[in-house]
Image (cartoon, helix red, strand yellow):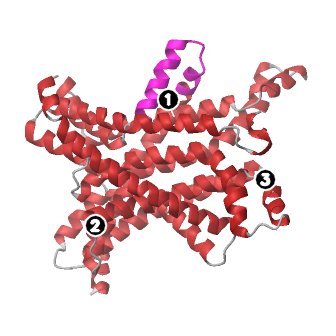
């Protein structure tokens, strides 16, 4: 029976459909990661600014995304904004908005952490050696920041990719939803559901695992 | 904002919060135990099992909980393994959380100087005594922030239990939203409920972090 079930995956264009569904989540994730890195850099800079008010806004923003499950935020935007402001965002737009809101704060905190973790004497010794400000940034601070930052940013990116699985809950037809459509179509195959969900599980793993391995190896290399 | 509506539905949310909390804490507890076991298997390089632990950690950390839950709840019954929604919830959360907890414990253990372990062995402590009295106390102190971050993360992840048809906070809110049309109030209460659940955890985390900050050997970390 089970070897019949697995064939559902490869019947017709089923597998291509799953991959297309996966692409929908990946697209959302990639856009989100791009926005989060750019805005996160700004966020990190604002978090270190002298203005107490600006810092508090960032603090509250960060606490909100830390406390609220992403699913709740998705519901707030997808269902709530339509009621509150009359914005009828579609699922994908809501997802990008919510995940960027979350990603920006998390990235910003990583940037802040990396920048403040560099001891002050690094800048001071460089200045004592007669390096210009630009040279200090380029040769002393930037390389050290990037080393600390890169593994963490990559790890956060895999978290963002995994979190995009949630968009199924706001009616985006992504890989899980496509999988359920296939299961519905092949309801005669009793074990179809098992194989389809196993395939989705594996697809996510195959996307995220290499990225995690990369982060791990970078971390080890920079640690030495 | 319709305060009367909000007042009249507080009991529903309280019931939902209880489900979220109960199964969340259950999962968190099991995840910590599983994480500690996996971490020790790897730390002491137990043959075969250390590989299994590594494989499990990679698998659990690189897949979304939502997919894991669907697999457990809707996939497994088709090959003859039937689990109740509650069992799926706890197993799913433990599976995901165990890997994150293992990593938190590992970073704690790695921060303990190797000389500590060797000194313990020289003093004639058995392996278990070494773990219990030398390694774990120091490792835990370092791992506390990461462990609490994981607790908060896992309790947030319980919002996905609604796909298992469990009446957790998320599902309570979703049911009210689709039946009443008071979307704004319903979602406001949902956000407030999660805040009420997680704020104490976060305060506890801050407290624990402050109390344990100087527990490291020789106070090296405070510099």
Q: Are marks 2 and 1 in contact (CB under 8 Å)?
A: no
Q: Residue B113 carries which label?
A: 3
Chain of the residue on which disc 3 is drawn: B
Residue identified by numbered label 1:
A39
Examine the rendering and report whether any part of residue A172 can be seen. no
Is residue A146 a member of the stretch shown in magenta? no
Where in the figure is residue B95, as x and y percent of width and height?
44, 63
Q: Is residue A16 above or below residue B29?
A: below
Q: Let me know if marks 2 and 3 both belong to one chain.
A: yes
Quadrant housing residue B109: bottom right
Indicate which label's residue lies in the foreground, 1 or 3: 3
What crowding class fits label 1: few (fewer than 14 Cα within 10 Å), some (14-19), or many (20 or more)? some
Q: Mainly helix, strand or loop, the magenta region?
A: helix
Quadrant housing residue A20: bottom left
Q: Judge left or right: residue B105 versus residue A140.
A: left
Task: Report, in whole angstroms, how far the alpha carbon at label 2 lies from the one at label 1.
Answer: 38 Å
Q: Is residue B24 above or below residue B221?
A: below
Task: Report, in whole angstroms, how far the alpha carbon at label 1 lies from the one at label 3.
Answer: 39 Å
User: At 57% across and 46% down in the image, what residue appears?
Assistant: B146
Magenta-highlighted residues: A43-65
What crowding class fits label 2: few (fewer than 14 Cα within 10 Å), some (14-19), or many (20 or more)? many
Q: Are marks 1 and 3 in contact (CB under 8 Å)?
A: no
Q: Judge left or right: residue A200 versus residue A205.
A: left
User: At 36% across and 41% down in the image, what residue appears?
Assistant: A69
Residue identified by numbered label 2:
B73
Q: Which of B133 and B89 is in front in this view?
A: B133
Task: Report, in whole angstroms, how far the alpha carbon at label 2 lies from the one at label 3.
Answer: 44 Å
């Amino acid at each position: 029976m089970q070897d019949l079930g697995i064939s559902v995956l490869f019947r017709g264009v089923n597998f291509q459909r799953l991959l297309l569904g996966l692409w929908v989540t990946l697209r959302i994730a990639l856009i989100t990661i791009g926005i989060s890195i750019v805005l996160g850099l700004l966020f990190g800079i604002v978090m270190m600014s002298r203005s107490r008010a600006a810092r508090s806004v960032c603090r509250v923003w960060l606490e909100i995304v830390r406390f609220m499950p992403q699913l709740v935020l998705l519901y707030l935007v997808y269902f709530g904004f339509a009621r509150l402001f009359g914005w009828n965002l579609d699922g994908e737009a809501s997802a990008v908005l919510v995940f960027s809101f979350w990603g920006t704060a998390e990235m910003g905190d990583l940037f802040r952490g990396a920048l403040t973790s560099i001891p002050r004497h690094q800048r001071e010794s460089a200045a004592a050696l007669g390096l210009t400000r630009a040279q200090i940034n380029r040769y002393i601070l930037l390389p050290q920041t990037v080393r600390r930052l890169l593994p963490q940013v990559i790890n956060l990116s895999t978290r963002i990719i995994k979190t995009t699985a949630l968009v199924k809950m706001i009616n985006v037809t992504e890989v899980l939803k496509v999988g359920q459509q296939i299961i519905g179509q092949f309801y005669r195959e009793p074990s179809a559901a098992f194989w389809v969900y196993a395939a989705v599980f594996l697809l996510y793993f195959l996307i995220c695992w290499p990225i995690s391995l990369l982060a791990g190896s970078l971390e080890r290399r920079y640690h030495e | 904002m319709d305060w009367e509506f909000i007042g009249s539905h507080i009991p529903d949310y309280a019931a939902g919060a209880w489900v979220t909390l109960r199964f969340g804490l259950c999962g968190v507890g099991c995840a910590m135990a599983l994480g500690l076991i996996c971490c020790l298997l790897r730390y002491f390089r137990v043959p075969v099992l250390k590989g299994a632990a590594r494989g499990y950690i990679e698998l659990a950390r690189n897949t979304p909980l939502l997919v894991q839950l669907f697999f457990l709840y809707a996939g497994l019954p088709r090959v003859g393994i039937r689990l109740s929604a509650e069992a799926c919830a706890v197993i799913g959360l433990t599976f995901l959380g165990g890997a994150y907890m293992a990593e938190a414990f590992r970073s704690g253990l790695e921060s303990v100087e190797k000389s500590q372990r060797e000194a313990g062995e020289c003093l004639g402590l058995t392996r278990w005594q070494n773990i219990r009295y030398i390694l774990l106390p120091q490792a835990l102190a370092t791992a506390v922030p990461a462990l609490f971050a994981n607790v908060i993360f896992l309790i947030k992840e319980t919002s996905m239990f609604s796909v298992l048809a469990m009446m957790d906070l998320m599902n309570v809110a979703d049911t009210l939203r689709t039946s009443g049309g008071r979307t704004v109030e319903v979602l406001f209460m949902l956000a407030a409920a999660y805040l009420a659940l997680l704020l104490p955890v976060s305060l506890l985390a801050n407290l624990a972090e402050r109390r344990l900050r100087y527990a490291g050997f020789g106070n090296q970390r405070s510099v």
